[in-house]
Image (cartoon, rainbow, N blue to C red):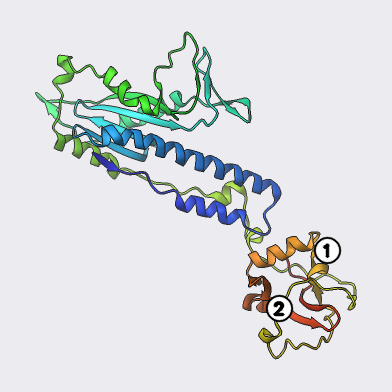
């Protein structure tokens, strides 16, 4: 029986993607965000693949309960568990999922390395990570309402398993025990091989389905999801996300004969103040190309920023100034010689 599905990661994906579209994002920050987004997507894919294999057998079993994506805080420690399987023998399988797209290698000291762009890269041991999860779970189970036998409180046993993609290659050493590193499609075979159903001591603590469900529900009630603070983590500021005024700066006189950008805006959409007659630019305003030069960016990049911030919009392959653009001080102009263009306050930054 599946008691809890994985929490959706859609809000995290949407937040990261929105930051990547921010006009003022530094290149280094963008690179970090792209890497975080890649890892998040890979993790989601790995957990989904493992969840399918887990649910196919354990999710359909009346003698097992499956909990996906469980985060528990207890006595200042946190356990972020990808998957749990509980059975009526009070065995708790703690499953840590890792999506190694190019494979994983383990040396004789139990150190893990993944392959990234054809090169090995050391990572923390997922086996040790899972042992820490189990340590938290052991303390948590002491606080749960557990069944008894002959006045003795029954205690669960814990099994640690690291699940990797069924398509990943695993480099195993000769001496270090890696039996608990299992491909997700081999999990059911691994569980059946390790269950000692003939042990009298083990059979003595078999519990009913209702009792097992009650225990699992107590665990789910302790779930404390956490939304990452990406802004603080990557140093993202409001100035990166939307335009803010710069301190007033002296601006050289404009060359009124300068060719404007080929940004079309139909005459029919201009207001009374946006006449086809060009009165010439105001000394306090710059054309898009001159504003781009003042900001130290290319004109095409500034156009993208203005659109991203909602000051301009594209419709029918033509560019229009928006209400927000007018509120920010932008103006549409029509030059008899050069055609339509836009003016912006000299202190506008995006």
Q: From the image, state whether disc 2 or disc 1 is nearer to you.
A: 2
Q: Residue furthest bottom?
A: 272
Q: Residue at x 19, y 31 (%)?
A: 63
Q: Residue at x 51, y 42 (%)?
A: 40
The residue that disc 2 covers is: 265
Please tell me in which quadrant of the rendered image residue 81 appears: top left
Q: Is residue 293 left or right of residue 183?
A: right
Q: Is residue 231 left or right of residue 244?
A: left
Tell me the element at label 1: helix
Give the CA distance from mark 2 to mark 1: 23 Å
10 Å neighbourhood of mark 1: few (<14), some, or many (≥20)? some
Q: Residue at x 54, y 40 (%)?
A: 39
Q: Nearer the viewer, residue 229 or 8?
A: 8
Instruction: Determine whether 60 is above or below 331 in the image.
Output: above
Q: Residue at x 79, y 64 (%)?
A: 292
Q: Residue furthest top?
A: 175
Percent across and percent down for residue 84 are 32, 33
Answer yes or no: is residue 350 visible. Answer: no
Percent across and percent down for residue 218 are 24, 41
Please tell me in which quadrant of the rendered image residue 197 appears: top left
Q: Nearer the viewer, residue 195 or 345?
A: 195
Percent across and percent down for residue 244 are 68, 67
Q: Quadrant of the N terminus?
A: top left
Answer yes or no: is residue 203 visible. Answer: yes
Q: Is residue 97 left or right of residue 315?
A: left
Q: Is residue 301 left or right of residue 56?
A: right
Please tell me in which quadrant of the rendered image residue 70 appears: top left
Q: Look at the numbered discs 2 and 1 and tell me whether their residues touch, using CB distance below 8 Å.
A: no
Q: Quadrant of the C terminus?
A: bottom right
10 Å neighbourhood of mark 2: few (<14), some, or many (≥20)? many
Residue 293's tag is: 1
């Amino acid at each position: 029986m599946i008691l809890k599905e994985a929490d959706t990661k859609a809000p995290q994906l949407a937040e990261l993607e929105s930051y990547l579209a921010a006009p003022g994002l530094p290149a280094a920050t963008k690179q970090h965000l792209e890497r975080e987004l890649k890892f998040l997507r890979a993790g989601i894919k790995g957990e989904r693949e493992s969840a399918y294999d887990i649910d196919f057998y354990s999710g359909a079993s009346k003698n097992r309960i499956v909990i996906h994506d469980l985060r528990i805080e207890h006595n200042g420690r946190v356990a972020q568990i990808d998957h749990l399987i509980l059975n009526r023998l009070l065995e708790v399988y703690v499953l840590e999922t890792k999506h190694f797209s190019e494979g994983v290698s383990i040396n004789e000291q139990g150190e893990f390395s993944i392959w990234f762009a054809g090169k090995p890269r050391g990572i923390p041991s997922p086996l040790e990570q899972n042992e820490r999860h189990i340590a938290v779970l052991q303390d948590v189970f002491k606080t749960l309402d557990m069944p008894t036998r002959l006045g003795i409180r029954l205690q669960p046993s814990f099994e640690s398993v690291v699940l990797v993609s069924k398509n990943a290659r695993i480099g195993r050493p000769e001496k270090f025990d890696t039996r608990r590193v299992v491909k997700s499609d081999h999990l059911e075979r691994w569980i059946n091989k390790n269950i000692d159903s003939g042990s009298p001591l083990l059979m003595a603590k078999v519990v009913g389905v209702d009792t097992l469900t009650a225990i699992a529900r107590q665990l789910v009630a302790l779930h404390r999801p956490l939304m990452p603070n990406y802004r603080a983590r990557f140093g993202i500021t409001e100035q990166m996300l939307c335009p803010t005024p710069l301190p007033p700066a002296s601006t050289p006189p404009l060359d009124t004969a300068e060719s404007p950008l080929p940004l079309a805006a139909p005459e029919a959409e201009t207001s009374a103040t946006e006449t086809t007659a060009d009165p010439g630019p105001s000394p306090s305003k710059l054309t898009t190309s001159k504003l781009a030069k003042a900001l130290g960016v290319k004109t095409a990049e500034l156009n993208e920023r203005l659109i991203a911030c909602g000051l301009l919009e594209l419709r029918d392959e033509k560019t229009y100034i928006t209400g927000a653009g007018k509120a920010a001080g932008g103006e549409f102009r029509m030059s008899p010689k050069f055609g339509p263009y836009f003016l912006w306050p000299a202190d506008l930054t995006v």
